[in-house]
Image (cartoon, rainbow, N blue to C red):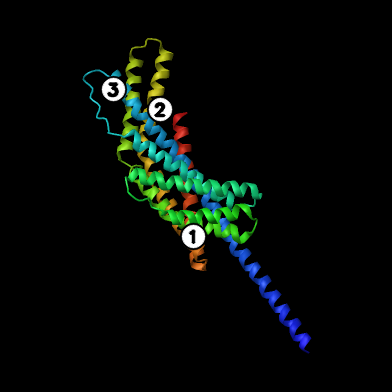
Amino acid sequence: MTHKKSLIKKVKIVFIFCLGVILVGCVSATSKQMTANFGGAAKAISLQTELTLKSVRASDSNLLVSTALTDNSTVLELPAISPKDIALRLTLLSEISKYSDALLIMSSDVELERIDKASRELYGALGALNQTIQQTTNSTEPPLASNDLQLVATAVNIAGRWFFERARLDAIKTSVTKADPVIKKAIELLTTEIKKDGTWSKSLKLSLESDAKNLFKVAQSIKKIESRRTLLSEAQQLYDQASFVDGTFTRLNSSLEELKASHSALSIALQNDSEVNIKNALNSLSKLESEITRIYAFQASLAETGE
């Protein structure tokens, strides 16, 4: 009888252990999928925003050339843009993209070597983001304290060396949780400039319109009909692109705000995987993915306009 009770007790222990593994597996699968979805979406938005800022940087130089080509009676009001400000925000976007890509890989079913590399890249991107934010804001302290950054380093180091599901999930949880204030601050620094009727959008629009005017002037002096028609068509395309600038910046601003909200919702769900928190995170991720769809649709309309 004693032996039977002992056997039943062992069976119960094994059952409870197996149930725990199954539950952890279910939570892990959901957490990893949410993190992977966020990583992919965040990377896409970062890259698209980065392309737009590079256009702004180019437009600032083009305006100086364009001003020299216009007649003396034409006065262009050039928005004041600091090359350093654009460079710092391009760095922020680059590091957000690297961080997001690392999260995507760490949340995927890949070999340990790739997880190890992604873990190190995530830590590096987070550290670089921390420093760039401090440099951009001229703060005495970075948004993420050194001891918190060290916690991330320890967690990702374990995840990269050992192929344990729990270790990887803990690394993702620690990284996203500690990174949340950094991501929030980085996006706030981006959205203050990437907005409709902001200095940067005005610079890009003015550059496109100025180039269009110059092409029209050149076209008027050309006698060959085909050559003139080509230049007039190019000028019209530039005017069309200028008309879409406000829409581009509005769309990107909205996407960045949604990215910030999604990261916070993901952070909360990873800390406390309650049904409500997971549902909120999934809803937020769905909105983020919808923003990407809108960006691509908007770009498609721009491409059609340019044809």
Q: CA distance from mark 2 to mark 1?
A: 41 Å
User: Looking at the image, is mark 3 or mark 2 nearer the viewer?
Assistant: 3
Residue 175 shown left or right of residue 22 in the figure: left
Residue at the disc numbered 2? 237
Badges 3 and 2: C-beta atoms under 8 Å apart? no
Looking at the figure, which quarter contains the N terminus? Answer: bottom right
Where is 302 relative to 111, above or below?
above
Near mark 1 (Cα within 10 A), the count class, few <14, some 14-19 or many ≥20, is: many
Return the residue found at the far bottom: 1
- Tag 2 and tag 1, C-beta contact below 8 Å: no
Q: Position of residue 253 (x, y in %)?
A: 38, 46
Question: Which residue sits at x=34%, y=16%?
Answer: 218
Q: Mark 2 vs mark 1: which is more N-terminal?
A: 2
Q: Secondary structure at mark 3?
A: helix
Q: Amino acid at mark 2?
A: Gln
Query: Percent x, y for residue 135?
Result: 36, 43
**2 or 1: mark nearer the eye:** 1
In primary-sequence order, the first of circles 1 and 3 is 3
Q: Quadrant of residue 249?
A: top left
Name which residue lies at 41% across and 36% down.
52
| Mark 3 Cα shell of 10 Å, populated few (<14), some (14-19), many (≥20) | some
Q: Which residue is mark 1?
A: 281
Please name the residue that numbered disc 3 is placed on. 67
Q: Is residue 293 visible?
A: no
Which sits earlier in the primary sequence, circle 3 or circle 2?
3
Q: Amino acid at mark 1?
A: Ala
The kind of residue tagged 3 is Thr
